[in-house]
Image (cartoon, rainbow, N blue to C red):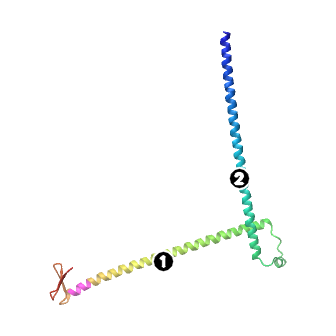
Amino acid sequence: MQSKYQQKLKREESVRIKKEAEEAKMQKMKAIQREKSNKLEEKKRLQENLRREAFREHQQYKTAEFLSRLDAELPDRSTCQTALRVPQSSAWARSQAYKDSLKEEENKKLQKKKEEQHQKSELLEFNRQQQEEERTKTHQAEHRRVNNIFLDRLQGKSQPGGFEHVGGHWNMNSGNSWDV
């Protein structure tokens, strides 16, 4: 009886040890996954920071480029400031000016594309008209040719000494003939 009880205890102990080993294994796997996840998040965070930094630098470059272009286009600043008494532009105003210039560039590009499309459509319409005129001329020339042949045949039949059609041959009253 006691040996059965001891065997049962041993089995329970081995099951408990197995469960603990599996649990430890699961905890180890979870820790590895957590570590991978943390590394991936850190990598994403670094990439996002790099992207933002690159965007900020690009934006600063474009803003500086715009402001230098704006400065070059304006007359002498000292005369302009004394004449107009305009306060120095704020960052918001510069930003607005930059946005406006981007919109203006976009509108210019759009207008240019519209003009190109309009020119293409005019060219296509012109080509279509030329083809239609060519077809009409060809058709009229063919029609004239057929009419002239018809009229020539009519004149030949009605005139003495003209052509006559006899059994697949054109005969002249003079006696010469040829196949049609």
| 14 inside magenta stretch | no
- Kind of residue at disc 1: Phe
Which comes sooner in the sequence, label 2 or label 1?
2
**Residue furthest top as drawn:** 1
Q: Quadrant of residue 2?
A: top right
What's the residue at 76%, 70% (across, down)? 67
Residue 101 shown left or right of residue 125 in the figure: right
User: At numbered mark 1, what does the secondary structure look like: helix, strand or loop?
Assistant: helix
Residue 104 shown left or right of residue 173 in the figure: right
Q: Is residue 30 above or below residue 138?
A: above
Q: Quadrant of residue 156?
A: bottom left
Find disc 2 in the rendering and name its residue. Answer: 47
Q: Are marks 2 and 1 in contact (CB under 8 Å)?
A: no
Neighbourhood count class around disc 2 (C-alpha, 10 Å): few under 14, some 14–19, many 20 upward: few
Find disc 1 in the rendering and name its residue. Answer: 126
The x, y position of residue 14, in whole percent, is: 67, 21
Q: Quadrant of the C terminus?
A: bottom left
What's the residue at 71%, 41% (across, down)? 35
The x, y position of residue 48, in whole percent, is: 71, 53
Question: Which secondary structure is most common in the magenta stretch?
Answer: helix
Residue 157 tag number: none
Q: Is residue 54 above or below residue 154?
A: above
What's the residue at 70%, 70% (across, down)? 101
| 154 inside magenta stretch | yes
Query: Which span is picked out in magenta?
Result: 150-156
Q: Is residue 7 above or below residue 178?
A: above
- Kind of residue at disc 2: Gln
User: At numbered mark 2, what does the secondary structure look like: helix, strand or loop?
Assistant: helix
